[in-house]
Amino acid sequence: MRALIAVGPNICVISAERRDEGWLIVASGPGHGPCPSCACHSSARHSTYWRNLRDLPLQGSPVMVRLRLARLRCREPTCDQQIFAERLPGVITPLLRRTCRVVDLMQAVGHVAGGKPAERLLSRLGLPASDDTVLRHVKHRARVNAIRAPLRVVGVDDWSWTKGQSYGTIMVDLERRRV
């Protein structure tokens, strides 16, 4: 059973409980990590906080992970950031309320099925999400995966809003059709 509820590496599962609305998993992070500003490793705890995350369904039921993470102190005297939150790359993304593997699944299903069909399929799989949320994740993945090749063909257009008063310029990548 413990292998079924593994949330990610360096995360200790404290308890797993079956409820009417699905599974509730209580877990805690490692309690140490690198400072995002100076990359100096720290385990000096300032405080803790809770994050509520959606994870992949277990036995066809939705899973809510209640994850206790640490706020840490950066002990590097030259660093401007004194307090930072523990990060778990590859497991959770800052500001998202879903684990990375849920986001990956939503992006894959949304890319293949589209908005409304993906919404219906994900709700049957135990991952309720609106079509707008699914499409937002698909678009975000497309932006992140966009090739950052140098521009080769650029179109420039200048115009005047009012005669002699205010002007505008637009530059367009003609190969990728992006502003």
Image (cartoon, rainbow, N blue to C red):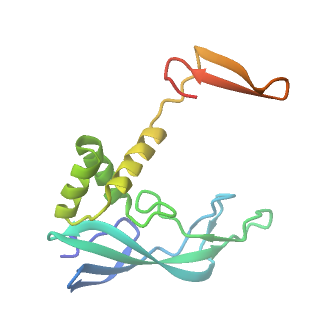
Q: Nearer the viewer, residue 54 or 162?
A: 162
Q: Quadrant of the N terminus?
A: bottom left
Q: Nearer the viewer, residue 76 or 175?
A: 175
Please provide percent x and percent y for residue 158. 72, 20
Residue furthest toward the left? 59
Q: Nearer the viewer, residue 9 or 62?
A: 62
Left or right, 50 with reference to 39: left
Note whether 132 is above or below 151 in the view shown: below
Please provide percent x and percent y for residue 12. 37, 76
Please provide percent x and percent y for residue 164. 85, 23
Residue at 21% from the left image edge and 70% from the top image edge? 4
Residue furthest toward the right? 164
Residue furthest toward the front? 163
| Location of residue 6 (image quadrant) | bottom left
Q: How many marks?
A: 0
Residue at 63% from the left image edge and 78% from the top image edge? 44
Residue at 54% from the left image edge and 29% from the top image edge? 148
Q: Quadrant of the C terminus?
A: top right
Left or right, 59 with reference to 112: left
Please provide percent x and percent y for residue 66. 39, 79
| Location of residue 73 (image quadrant) | bottom right
Left or right, 163 with reference to 71: right
Note whether 159 is above or below 123 in the view shown: above
